[in-house]
Image (spheres, rainbow, N blue to C red):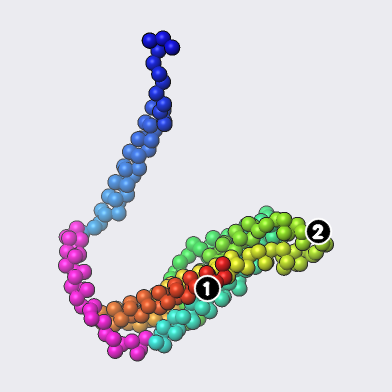
Amino acid sequence: MSKNETTPVWQHRTTGKRLAIWFAWLLLVALCVFCWQVMTKDTIWAFVSDAPRQAADLGGRMFPPRWSYIDKLWVPLWDTLNIATLGTMLGIIVAIPIAFLAASNTTPSRYFVRPVALFIIVASRSINSLIWALLLVSIIGPGLLSGIIAIGLRSIGFVAKLLYEAIEETDILQIEAVTATGASRAQILNYGIVPQIMPAFYGISVFRWDINIRESTILGLVGAGGIGVQLQASLNTLAWPQVTMIFVVILGTVVISEWVSARVRHAII
Protein backbone atom coordinates (compact mmCIF):
# COMPACT_ATOMS: atom_id res chain seq x y z
CA MET A 1 0.00 0.00 0.00
CA SER A 2 1.43 3.38 -0.99
CA LYS A 3 1.75 6.33 1.35
CA ASN A 4 -0.98 8.25 -0.52
CA GLU A 5 -3.54 5.53 0.13
CA THR A 6 -5.54 5.71 3.36
CA THR A 7 -7.04 2.87 5.33
CA PRO A 8 -10.83 2.81 4.90
CA VAL A 9 -12.79 3.55 8.06
CA TRP A 10 -15.73 1.25 8.78
CA GLN A 11 -19.01 3.00 9.49
CA HIS A 12 -22.16 1.40 10.86
CA ARG A 13 -24.37 3.50 8.56
CA THR A 14 -23.75 5.55 5.48
CA THR A 15 -24.11 9.31 5.54
CA GLY A 16 -27.42 9.08 3.71
CA LYS A 17 -28.84 6.60 6.23
CA ARG A 18 -27.73 8.76 9.16
CA LEU A 19 -29.41 11.81 7.63
CA ALA A 20 -32.58 9.79 7.01
CA ILE A 21 -32.64 8.64 10.65
CA TRP A 22 -32.16 12.18 11.95
CA PHE A 23 -34.90 13.42 9.62
CA ALA A 24 -37.24 10.68 10.88
CA TRP A 25 -36.54 11.67 14.49
CA LEU A 26 -37.20 15.31 13.60
CA LEU A 27 -40.57 14.39 12.09
CA LEU A 28 -41.41 12.31 15.18
CA VAL A 29 -40.62 15.21 17.53
CA ALA A 30 -42.65 17.59 15.36
CA LEU A 31 -45.57 15.14 15.41
CA CYS A 32 -45.40 14.82 19.21
CA VAL A 33 -45.37 18.61 19.60
CA PHE A 34 -48.36 18.94 17.26
CA CYS A 35 -50.32 16.22 19.09
CA TRP A 36 -49.51 17.83 22.45
CA GLN A 37 -50.86 21.16 21.22
CA VAL A 38 -54.05 19.54 19.92
CA MET A 39 -54.66 17.63 23.17
CA THR A 40 -54.00 20.60 25.45
CA LYS A 41 -55.59 23.44 23.50
CA ASP A 42 -58.66 23.41 25.80
CA THR A 43 -56.72 22.75 29.00
CA ILE A 44 -57.15 25.29 31.78
CA TRP A 45 -53.66 25.41 33.22
CA ALA A 46 -54.82 27.18 36.36
CA PHE A 47 -56.69 24.01 37.29
CA VAL A 48 -53.62 21.92 36.50
CA SER A 49 -51.42 24.02 38.75
CA ASP A 50 -54.00 23.66 41.51
CA ALA A 51 -54.25 19.88 41.04
CA PRO A 52 -51.70 18.89 43.74
CA ARG A 53 -53.61 20.85 46.38
CA GLN A 54 -56.94 19.37 45.28
CA ALA A 55 -55.48 15.86 45.26
CA ALA A 56 -54.10 16.34 48.78
CA ASP A 57 -57.49 17.63 49.96
CA LEU A 58 -59.31 14.65 48.43
CA GLY A 59 -56.79 12.23 49.89
CA GLY A 60 -57.36 13.73 53.33
CA ARG A 61 -61.11 13.15 52.97
CA MET A 62 -60.61 9.52 51.89
CA PHE A 63 -58.60 8.48 54.96
CA PRO A 64 -59.09 6.68 57.17
CA PRO A 65 -61.32 4.11 55.40
CA ARG A 66 -64.73 3.43 56.91
CA TRP A 67 -64.12 -0.14 58.05
CA SER A 68 -67.69 -0.56 59.30
CA TYR A 69 -68.86 -0.24 55.70
CA ILE A 70 -67.27 -3.55 54.77
CA ASP A 71 -70.33 -5.47 55.99
CA LYS A 72 -72.32 -3.98 53.10
CA LEU A 73 -69.74 -5.06 50.50
CA TRP A 74 -69.75 -8.84 50.86
CA VAL A 75 -72.89 -9.43 48.78
CA PRO A 76 -71.84 -7.01 45.98
CA LEU A 77 -68.38 -8.59 46.01
CA TRP A 78 -69.96 -12.04 45.64
CA ASP A 79 -72.02 -10.69 42.74
CA THR A 80 -68.85 -9.36 41.14
CA LEU A 81 -67.16 -12.76 41.40
CA ASN A 82 -70.23 -14.40 39.87
CA ILE A 83 -70.26 -11.90 37.01
CA ALA A 84 -66.60 -12.61 36.28
CA THR A 85 -66.90 -16.39 36.57
CA LEU A 86 -70.15 -16.88 34.66
CA GLY A 87 -69.12 -14.32 32.04
CA THR A 88 -65.83 -16.14 31.53
CA MET A 89 -67.63 -19.46 31.15
CA LEU A 90 -70.03 -17.92 28.62
CA GLY A 91 -67.15 -16.44 26.64
CA ILE A 92 -65.22 -19.73 26.62
CA ILE A 93 -68.23 -21.74 25.44
CA VAL A 94 -68.75 -19.41 22.47
CA ALA A 95 -65.03 -18.91 21.79
CA ILE A 96 -64.10 -22.59 21.38
CA PRO A 97 -66.01 -23.23 18.11
CA ILE A 98 -65.04 -19.78 16.80
CA ALA A 99 -61.37 -20.58 17.42
CA PHE A 100 -61.59 -23.82 15.44
CA LEU A 101 -63.39 -22.00 12.63
CA ALA A 102 -60.74 -19.25 12.61
CA ALA A 103 -57.67 -21.53 12.66
CA SER A 104 -56.30 -22.07 9.16
CA ASN A 105 -55.70 -25.79 9.74
CA THR A 106 -59.18 -26.60 11.11
CA THR A 107 -61.54 -24.18 9.37
CA PRO A 108 -63.94 -25.74 6.84
CA SER A 109 -63.56 -22.72 4.51
CA ARG A 110 -60.63 -20.31 4.36
CA TYR A 111 -62.47 -17.89 2.06
CA PHE A 112 -65.81 -17.54 3.87
CA VAL A 113 -66.01 -19.19 7.30
CA ARG A 114 -62.55 -18.13 8.48
CA PRO A 115 -63.00 -14.41 7.63
CA VAL A 116 -66.36 -14.41 9.43
CA ALA A 117 -64.80 -16.03 12.53
CA LEU A 118 -61.91 -13.56 12.48
CA PHE A 119 -64.36 -10.68 12.17
CA ILE A 120 -66.22 -11.90 15.27
CA ILE A 121 -62.93 -12.07 17.17
CA VAL A 122 -61.92 -8.56 16.12
CA ALA A 123 -65.39 -7.15 16.88
CA SER A 124 -65.37 -8.66 20.36
CA ARG A 125 -61.90 -7.38 21.17
CA SER A 126 -62.58 -3.91 19.77
CA ILE A 127 -65.34 -3.02 22.25
CA ASN A 128 -64.51 -2.65 25.91
CA SER A 129 -66.56 -4.57 28.45
CA LEU A 130 -67.81 -1.29 29.94
CA ILE A 131 -69.22 -0.30 26.54
CA TRP A 132 -70.81 -3.74 26.17
CA ALA A 133 -72.38 -3.32 29.61
CA LEU A 134 -73.68 0.14 28.74
CA LEU A 135 -75.33 -1.21 25.59
CA LEU A 136 -76.78 -4.26 27.34
CA VAL A 137 -78.19 -2.20 30.22
CA SER A 138 -80.03 -0.13 27.61
CA ILE A 139 -81.31 -3.30 25.89
CA ILE A 140 -82.16 -5.77 28.66
CA GLY A 141 -82.10 -3.48 31.69
CA PRO A 142 -79.76 -3.13 34.69
CA GLY A 143 -78.65 -6.08 36.74
CA LEU A 144 -76.22 -8.96 36.91
CA LEU A 145 -77.35 -10.48 33.60
CA SER A 146 -76.13 -7.44 31.68
CA GLY A 147 -72.76 -7.70 33.41
CA ILE A 148 -72.43 -11.43 32.74
CA ILE A 149 -73.22 -11.07 29.04
CA ALA A 150 -70.93 -8.04 28.74
CA ILE A 151 -68.02 -9.97 30.24
CA GLY A 152 -68.84 -12.94 28.01
CA LEU A 153 -68.93 -10.87 24.83
CA ARG A 154 -65.62 -9.25 25.71
CA SER A 155 -64.02 -12.61 26.54
CA ILE A 156 -64.93 -14.23 23.22
CA GLY A 157 -62.35 -12.34 21.19
CA PHE A 158 -59.56 -12.74 23.76
CA VAL A 159 -60.00 -16.49 24.26
CA ALA A 160 -60.72 -17.27 20.61
CA LYS A 161 -57.69 -15.34 19.34
CA LEU A 162 -55.18 -17.01 21.64
CA LEU A 163 -56.82 -20.40 21.19
CA TYR A 164 -56.85 -20.34 17.40
CA GLU A 165 -53.20 -19.31 17.42
CA ALA A 166 -52.47 -22.32 19.64
CA ILE A 167 -54.38 -24.54 17.20
CA GLU A 168 -52.34 -23.27 14.27
CA GLU A 169 -49.11 -23.96 16.18
CA THR A 170 -49.89 -27.64 16.83
CA ASP A 171 -47.33 -30.24 15.78
CA ILE A 172 -48.24 -31.43 12.28
CA LEU A 173 -46.41 -34.74 12.79
CA GLN A 174 -48.84 -35.82 15.51
CA ILE A 175 -51.77 -34.87 13.33
CA GLU A 176 -50.33 -36.80 10.38
CA ALA A 177 -49.81 -39.84 12.60
CA VAL A 178 -53.47 -39.83 13.62
CA THR A 179 -54.56 -39.22 10.02
CA ALA A 180 -52.47 -42.18 8.81
CA THR A 181 -54.58 -44.53 10.93
CA GLY A 182 -57.61 -43.69 8.80
CA ALA A 183 -59.21 -41.52 11.48
CA SER A 184 -62.17 -39.31 10.62
CA ARG A 185 -62.02 -35.52 10.81
CA ALA A 186 -63.66 -35.54 14.24
CA GLN A 187 -61.18 -38.14 15.50
CA ILE A 188 -58.26 -36.10 14.15
CA LEU A 189 -59.51 -33.11 16.14
CA ASN A 190 -60.11 -35.22 19.23
CA TYR A 191 -56.84 -37.16 19.27
CA GLY A 192 -54.45 -35.07 17.18
CA ILE A 193 -55.23 -31.43 18.00
CA VAL A 194 -57.18 -31.18 21.26
CA PRO A 195 -54.55 -32.89 23.46
CA GLN A 196 -51.90 -30.46 22.18
CA ILE A 197 -53.90 -27.33 22.93
CA MET A 198 -55.37 -28.29 26.31
CA PRO A 199 -52.53 -26.77 28.42
CA ALA A 200 -52.83 -23.51 26.47
CA PHE A 201 -56.62 -23.64 26.79
CA TYR A 202 -56.50 -23.98 30.57
CA GLY A 203 -53.95 -21.21 30.88
CA ILE A 204 -55.94 -18.86 28.64
CA SER A 205 -59.17 -19.56 30.53
CA VAL A 206 -57.68 -18.89 33.95
CA PHE A 207 -55.87 -15.79 32.70
CA ARG A 208 -59.09 -14.41 31.23
CA TRP A 209 -60.97 -15.12 34.46
CA ASP A 210 -58.34 -13.13 36.33
CA ILE A 211 -58.76 -10.21 33.92
CA ASN A 212 -62.55 -10.39 34.12
CA ILE A 213 -62.53 -10.04 37.90
CA ARG A 214 -60.84 -6.68 37.49
CA GLU A 215 -63.15 -5.57 34.71
CA SER A 216 -66.33 -6.67 36.48
CA THR A 217 -65.58 -4.40 39.46
CA ILE A 218 -66.46 -1.30 37.43
CA LEU A 219 -69.47 -2.58 35.48
CA GLY A 220 -71.77 -1.39 38.25
CA LEU A 221 -70.92 2.18 37.27
CA VAL A 222 -73.30 1.74 34.32
CA GLY A 223 -75.83 -0.38 36.18
CA ALA A 224 -74.53 -3.87 35.40
CA GLY A 225 -74.39 -5.02 39.02
CA GLY A 226 -71.59 -5.95 41.35
CA ILE A 227 -69.49 -3.88 43.70
CA GLY A 228 -69.40 -1.08 41.14
CA VAL A 229 -72.95 -0.18 42.16
CA GLN A 230 -71.74 0.55 45.70
CA LEU A 231 -68.83 2.51 44.27
CA GLN A 232 -71.15 4.63 42.16
CA ALA A 233 -73.48 5.28 45.10
CA SER A 234 -70.57 6.32 47.31
CA LEU A 235 -69.17 8.62 44.64
CA ASN A 236 -72.56 10.25 44.12
CA THR A 237 -72.89 11.02 47.82
CA LEU A 238 -69.22 12.07 48.15
CA ALA A 239 -68.73 9.42 50.82
CA TRP A 240 -64.98 9.28 50.34
CA PRO A 241 -64.14 6.98 53.31
CA GLN A 242 -66.56 4.44 51.80
CA VAL A 243 -64.87 4.83 48.42
CA THR A 244 -61.53 4.06 50.04
CA MET A 245 -62.99 0.97 51.69
CA ILE A 246 -64.32 -0.22 48.34
CA PHE A 247 -60.89 0.33 46.80
CA VAL A 248 -59.31 -1.74 49.57
CA VAL A 249 -61.75 -4.60 48.98
CA ILE A 250 -61.22 -4.47 45.21
CA LEU A 251 -57.45 -4.44 45.66
CA GLY A 252 -57.58 -7.41 48.00
CA THR A 253 -59.82 -9.32 45.61
CA VAL A 254 -57.55 -8.65 42.65
CA VAL A 255 -54.45 -9.70 44.60
CA ILE A 256 -56.09 -12.96 45.66
CA SER A 257 -57.34 -13.67 42.13
CA GLU A 258 -53.87 -12.98 40.76
CA TRP A 259 -52.37 -15.43 43.24
CA VAL A 260 -54.96 -18.10 42.43
CA SER A 261 -54.49 -17.55 38.69
CA ALA A 262 -50.71 -17.83 38.96
CA ARG A 263 -50.89 -21.02 41.03
CA VAL A 264 -53.37 -22.64 38.67
CA ARG A 265 -51.37 -21.73 35.56
CA HIS A 266 -48.20 -23.01 37.22
CA ALA A 267 -49.91 -26.30 38.12
CA ILE A 268 -51.25 -26.72 34.57
CA ILE A 269 -48.30 -25.56 32.52
In the rendered image, which quarter is residue 110 located in?
bottom right
Q: Quadrant of residue 91?
A: bottom right
Residue 248 falls within the magenta-colored stretch: no
Q: Which residue is more in the foreground, 242 or 166?
A: 166
Identify the residue shown where x is 40% and y is 78%. Answer: 253
- The rendered magenta stretch, by its main secondary structure, is classed as helix
Quarter of the view holding residue 93: bottom right
| Dot label at residue 264 | 1
From the viewer's perspective, is the residue at label 1 or at label 2 nearer?
1
SS under mark 1: helix
Question: Would residue 140 be seen by someone viewing this image from the given angle?
Answer: no
User: Magenta residues?
Assistant: 45-73
What amino acid is at disc 2? Ala
Identify which amino acid the numbered label 1 is placed on.
Val
Quadrant of the snapshot with the C terminus: bottom right
Residue at mark 2: 180
Left or right for 245, reference 162: left
